[in-house]
Amino acid sequence: MVFSFSQRKALSIIPHITGALSVIGSLSILYDILKDRSRKLHRPYYRILLGMSFFDVFASASLGMSTLPIPKGTEGVYGAMGTTRTCAAQGFFIQLMLVSPFYNLMLAWYYLLLGKNKPLSEEAIASKYEKYMHAFAMIPVLFAVMGLPLTLYNSADLWCWIAAYPPTCKNKDGTHGPDWPCERGENAWLFRWTFFYAPLWFIIAAITVMMIILTRAVRREEKQVIEMQKQTRLRRPSFEREEEIRREQHLQNYIPQREQPVHLERSKQMFYQAVFYVGAFYITYVFATLNRLTQLIGGDNIFVFMIMTSTLTPMQGFLNFLVYRHGPCVA
């Protein structure tokens, strides 16, 4: 689908705004941790957030540059002012944004280790698992580096990323046509799936499963605590029990009865935390995924999906900041 001049202009300008918000959010997390580093950097939780935010600064800044690094004169792109080298540099740093989801997966694992039926201490997590967490989160760095000699980073309309050049060397679904050889980005469609979409979808599924397991484990534990408290009250001497009943009846005359059952507060916090982290992933990547699927099915970009992709994809750092500042931390 060929977009109008106004549509192309909007697609180019919006990432400048959302990318800047993301950079500010990530830098705010870094500042908040480092200003109190003597206390916070002793905890694996903050060290994981530090690594995630550090890489997101570069990815968000690159996404925020939007079409500026795309080679000047690229057809159908508004605001292109760069060269092949600036395009490759932007594509490299944008590919690094996958580090943030990898670190989010490690953060979910960290919470699972703390909240499972036989929880580990932070010291045990740091000594046994943390080095593997950081090593695993560095896998996308390898993907990004591999893209440079493979000349994968070219104009992808919204910004420079994994794409074929010239665009005419590929079919509408992204695969390569037989009639026109690619100068750069050979088999870019395959590397998009290998280096980005497949790992991303795996991470989203894994985090969702981890958070469900964690919430169920905490709910089981707290139900057991409540049951133990009930049994303890039943074992009290009868006069204490009668006095407690009288007090409860007295309060009932003045306090309206709640219709809902007793809440398991910590379990609720775990549930909302799962919603926050998984929701941040969905908000960031859902439209990019939908846009990619429509390309595979119909071969054309849909403007609504494109505008939402250009708006939300650069906001990963900002969403992480919202979770960091306002999400319930129950670790």
Image (cartoon, helix red, strand yellow):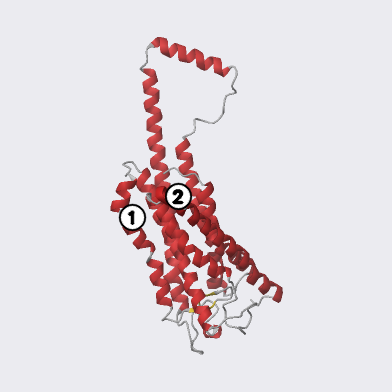
Q: Give percent across and percent down for residue 29.
A: 50, 55
Q: Report the residue at 48% width, 47% height from top.
A: 273
Displayed quadrant of residue 49: bottom left
Q: Is residue 206 visible?
A: no
Local SS, label 2: loop
Amino acid type, callout 1: Glu
Q: Give percent across and percent down for residue 278.
A: 49, 53
Among all residues in the image, which is located at the extreme left?
A: 128
Q: How many circles with numbers are drawn on the protein?
A: 2
> For this view, does 25 lie left or right of residue 238?
right
Q: Which residue is mark 2?
A: 36
Q: Is residue 10 above or below residue 119?
A: below
Amino acid type, callout 2: Asp
Q: Earlier in the sequence, mark 1 or mark 2?
A: 2
Is 141 in front, or is 184? Answer: 141
Mark 1 to mark 2: distance in Å?
21 Å
> For this view, does 241 lie left or right of residue 290?
left
Q: Is residue 82 visible?
A: yes
Q: Which residue is mark 1?
A: 130
Q: Report the residue at 52% width, 85% height from top.
A: 169
Q: Quadrant of the N terminus?
A: bottom right
Question: Dot 2 surroundings within 10 Å: few (below 14), some, or many (20 or more)?
Answer: few
Is 118 in front, or is 298? Answer: 118
> For this view, does 110 lie left or right of residue 124?
right
Among all residues in the image, which is located at the extreme top?
A: 239
Local SS, label 1: helix
Q: Give percent across and percent down for residue 272.
A: 50, 45
Q: Report the residue at 48% width, 84% height from top.
A: 184
